[in-house]
Amino acid sequence: MKITHLRFYGGSRQKVCRLGLADLFLEIQEIVLATPILLKERKDANGAAVIRKNLDAAFEKAEGWKQAKTGAVDWIKRFRHQDVVETSLGVEIQVSARSDLLIRDVVHLRNSLQEAKIDIGVIVVPSDLLQRFLPDRTPCFSDARRYIEQEFKEAMTYPIIVLAVEHDGPGEALPKQRRIA
């Protein structure tokens, strides 16, 4: 995948540097960049679940990332400085077909930040371009900005980074998830 935009909130850029989390933040970017996604470049032609599945598989394969249960931050990795100070990053992957779930991700990150489970949160969302090729209610970078900057302004004070991702190029349509009635 490609990374098209980064948006830093609540001093997250400075905190990444101050807490020595630059390598861990780069690792997140490497995981995303190493996850290949090709799809049909036609409006609403692809399912989003394959993207989520591939990103989860990439985090699972990467050393040290722990997947959380439902209702918590998706992925967390802890980092020790000289066996004294422990810091951590939490990652929420939001490529579901419901943009309103972005606010739940912000709440998960807020709670984990307040409970000192993580020091910085990262939300991975489709870029505005990628979103056009996914189901119509799939969130995108603009949605994440709107939720954080307008609808839940308090979130701008949290050390959160929004990372917009895009597919690598054209390919076959990604299968859509079928709902069982």
Image (tube, rainbow, N blue to C red):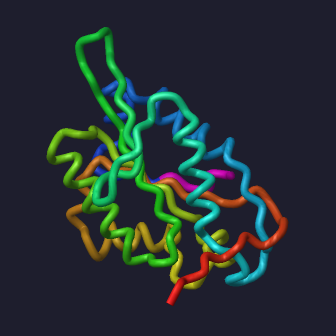
92 in relation to 172, above or below:
above
Which residue is at 78% across, 74% downward?
41
- The residue that appears at 24% across and 68% down in the rendered structure is 153
Q: Position of residue 55 (x, y in %)?
A: 58, 51
State whether residue 104 is above or below residue 26.
below
Residue 130's quadrant in the figure? bottom right
Residue at screen point 27% across, 40% down? 118
Query: Which residue is outermost to the right?
Result: 171
- Residue 111 lies, in percent from the top left, at 20, 53
Magenta-colored segment: predominant secondary structure: strand
Viewer-proximal residue among 181 and 143? 181
Where does the image place residue 129, in percent across and percent down from the top left? 66, 71
Residue 152 relative to residue 98: left or right? left
Nearest to the observer: residue 4 or residue 98: 98
Q: Residue at x 48, y 27 (%)?
A: 23
| Residue furthest front in the image | 181
Q: Is residue 89 left or right of residue 24?
A: left
Report if residue 149 lies within the magenta region.
Answer: no
Which residue is more in the foreground, 77 or 159? 77
Instruction: Say if 168 sits above or below 170 in the image.
Output: above
With respect to residue 179, does 6 lie above or below?
Answer: above
Residues rendered magenta in the picture: 1-6
